Image (spheres, grey):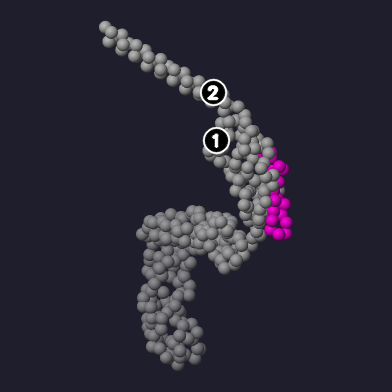
Amino acid sequence: MNSNISSSNLVKKKQKIKLFLIFNVVSFLFWGITKFSKNYSELVFFDVRFVNSPNLMKIESDYKTIDGYINASGFQILFYRFFPKEIFVDASTAEFNNNNNGVIDLLSQRRSLDDQIKGNFLSFENDKLFFKYFKLKSKKVKVNINTEFKFQSGYSSINDFKIEPDSVTISGPEHLIKDINYVNTVLVEMDKISKDIEFFAQIINNDLNNINLHPKKVLYKESVKRFTEQDFEIFINVINKPDSIKIKLFPEKVKLTSSYPFELINEIKNGDFELVFDYLKTENAKFESIPIDIIRYPIFSRNIRWTPTTISYLIKK
């Protein structure tokens, strides 16, 4: 019986201890909430980011933080100390001198700085931010598109691709940009292409900290069509022949094969192609045979070839 009484007393004692601990934890929480809900004036450090810098100007400052006394709740001050906040300083209000030095008055921007925090600034350790600035040069350069395309069988591009814009403006220190004549885009790979191509390509900037690009990406466009292949018989025209001679070609016509958009299958004719025998290439009949050249063909034709590629001739005077 005594054993049961002892066990019961032990349980009651443990319950009292638990209640006591819970009471203390709840009391501490209420105390903490009450304490940190109040407003305090404390020194807080904020990371600095300059915005609205004048065009073609780069600002470099030794000030990485703004040290300011703020009036805010204890919770907010604690948060700012554990997670430093970045605030924006308007560089358009700065004063610039001829020695590449500038200064920004923080007091004149107090209202905009207050709007960026939970609370308000009372004062600053340093009312002014001093910095160095550098004037930049700018120029336009061409864009070199970087692609690896593989078309689905029976498909091909119908015309030259377009880039919008085809050039971009780069700005930076003169010694860095003077030898730059073009910029490259990141590699874009596509496989089994069977429809028009259109995408934005990002321009590579290997010197992000010192060179600015505008714009930073370009629009790439290219038309893609289904192609078919067809054979044609083309008579060869003789050019640059003296009037005093006659020339007999062997053969007089060749078999020409061309690929073109399937939708134009009923529009392409033999007369759309012109192959020529250029007498000047014989060097006054020095060579027995010469290659023939194509001087006219539809602009959307692809993979044009003919056989034979060289022909013989006979001169009659």
User: Residue 20: horizontal and vertical position, in percent?
Assistant: 44, 17
> Observer-nearest residue: 251 or 32?
32
> Observer-nearest residue: 46 or 197?
46
Q: Which residue lies under the disc numbered 2? A: 31
Q: Residue at x 58, y 34 (%)?
A: 77
Mark in front: 2 vs 1: 2
The span from disc 2 to disc 1 (Cα, nearest Å) is 18 Å
Q: Residue at x 64, y 37 (%)?
A: 69
On the rendered image, what quadrant is the C terminus found in?
A: bottom left
User: Residue 269: horizontal and vertical position, in percent?
Assistant: 44, 68
Which amino acid does the dot numbered 1 rest on? Phe
> Residue 174 sits in which quadrant?
bottom right
Residue 14 appears in the picture as rendered? yes
* In the image: residue 293, left or right of residue 169: left
Q: Is residue 107 magenta?
A: yes
The disc label shown at residue 79, or none: 1
User: Residue 264: horizontal and vertical position, in percent?
Assistant: 44, 61
On the rendered image, what quadrant is the N terminus found in?
A: top left
Q: Is residue 35 magenta?
A: no
Q: Which residues are magenta?
A: 94-114
SS label for mark 1: helix
Which amino acid does the dot numbered 2 rest on? Trp
> Observer-nearest residue: 226 or 6?
6
Furthest-bottom residue in this view: 317
- Badge 1 crowding class, 10 Å Cα cut-off, few under 14, some 14 to 19, many 20 or more, is few
* In the image: residue 153, left or right of residue 110: left
Furthest-front residue in this view: 2
User: Residue 76: horizontal and vertical position, in percent?
Assistant: 57, 33
SS label for mark 2: helix
